[in-house]
Image (spheres, rainbow, N blue to C red):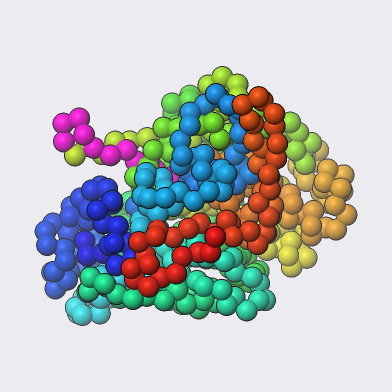
Amino acid sequence: MKLNKISFVLLAAVPILSLLSCKKYLDEAPDNRTEINSVEKVAQLVSTAYPTYDYLTFTESSSDNAEDKGVGIGSTDEMFDLPYNWVDVIGTGTNSTSNYWNGCYEGIAAANQALEAIEKENLGAAVLPYKGEALVARAYAHFMLAILYATPYEIGGSNSAPGIPYITAPETKVIVQYDRGTVQSTYEKIEKDLEDGLKLLSASAYKTPKYHFTPAAAHAFASRFYLFKGEWKKVIEHATLTVPGNDFVSNIRPITTGLKDMTGEEFNAAFFSSAQKYNLLLSNNYSTYHYQYGPRHGYGSKLVKMFTTANVTGKILANRVVSYGVPQYTTYKYKGYFFNTGPGIGFPYLTSASLTVDEALMNRAEAYAELGDNDLALKDINDFYSVRTDSYSPVNDAVTLAKINNFYKLSNPKDGLIRTILDAKKAEFLQEGIRWFDIIRRRLTVVHNNFDASGLETFTELKPGDKRRLFQLPKEVKLSGIELNPR
């Protein structure tokens, strides 16, 4: 596939998996854009407009959902160890920040090529759902880049810091100069693509809808986007549209019922399955994250307390706790696969959820809290906990403002509700990478422990405003005139 120069400079390091995928969808000579001349070919091309890599390793390791388990405990891997210590990963190794950057721009390149073909060919109304998908996918990839590589959006601020290059046309030259624009201009372009695309989407356009931006998935994305922008009413509007009839309880993760009754292997295979109602957008990514069951820096004895001690409800979460021997733990959510390219060779990949009903519900709860609609925020919080607490009783176990005040010692209702929401998400989305989004959005300080060879434990902090909270761009982008993040 013809790649945008931003990722093309790293083409030699891009695994063949993504290129083989493009060739499979487009049959042959995909760079000849005049051949994208049918609705079917546009649809096939748009299906590749999603990041081919994941952010799990570096966002999770950088967040407070990781801990140092001690010298000699677990495996050492720089893709976990360097982000844990907020040190830049150099190069395009598997699970690196550079790979995710490249994967997003590969997806953007596919979306742009599809949109160009739609404009040039007279394909009629049947192509409109795929135009909508291309626009929303382009918005999503740029938004993820903005979250991870640019200064966080400041609600009510000027947002004049450098954003990320927003690419809206296929690349036709080997070297092109790009500008990062500002955070404000980046968000404006994301919003336009998102809103324009949402109007065109169709829930019935796909054989496997969970791998595409259906209306429900796009509304979940919009709820996250407007949460960053602080447009609370839009968060509520879009989150509500992710499920029919406002029935979140029947559509979020059934921790205490369906998932609990499964064997370990069944759970492992089912958690990110397209058959699960709570998964709104799934992604297949080249990754070895699921193979790292015991990294030194990750899910350990400090974090497991989220599932073994009482929370604000007064009870303990019913989420599975799987251990390979203390202090090695895993959520066991990911089932790995292998893409064979020949006898004994190929590429590892995993399926993960980019967007879920559960996240959309908690986005809405936070928006209600921001607007002072405390009763509605509490209802969403209690709906969330009701399927995660064994023998949940609405009378005895429901979260109340009084319980929040007693548990967190926060008398301000809004502060207490938001703390409750963030902590609920921290536990539920452990090992899913999105805790980092709340950290940068809410300007939370991250505290990491570190053990030295003698066993002495010290603590370091990553505070708001620290330059290391922005992941570094691939150094090769300087060839296109793009400035790196300051260090």
Main SS, magenta residues: strand
Report the quarter where the N terminus lies.
Answer: bottom left
Q: Position of residue 40 (x, y in %)?
A: 20, 63
Q: Position of residue 127 (x, y in %)?
A: 27, 71
Viewed as shown, does residue 457 lie left or right of 222? right
Placement of 58 over or under 158, stated as above or below: above
Placement of 131 over or under 439, stated as above or below: below
User: Which range is magenta?
Assistant: 342-353
Viewed as shown, does residue 463 lie left or right of 175? right
Q: From this viewpoint, is residue 133 visible?
A: no
Q: Where is residue 39 in the image (x, y as percent from the top left)?
A: 21, 68
- Kindly give the residue lying farthest to the front in the view shown: 454
Residue at image coords 20%, 80%: 120
Is 257 or 218 nearer to us in this picture? Answer: 218
Q: Quadrant of residue 177?
A: bottom left
Residue at image coords 53%, 64%: 486
Report the quarter where the C terminus lies.
Answer: bottom right
Residue 409 drawn in magenta: no
Residue at image coords 59%, 39%: 66
Q: Quadrant of residue 46?
A: bottom left
Residue at image coords 68%, 44%: 460
Q: From this viewpoint, is residue 185 visible?
A: yes
Q: In which quarter of the image is residue 322?
A: top right
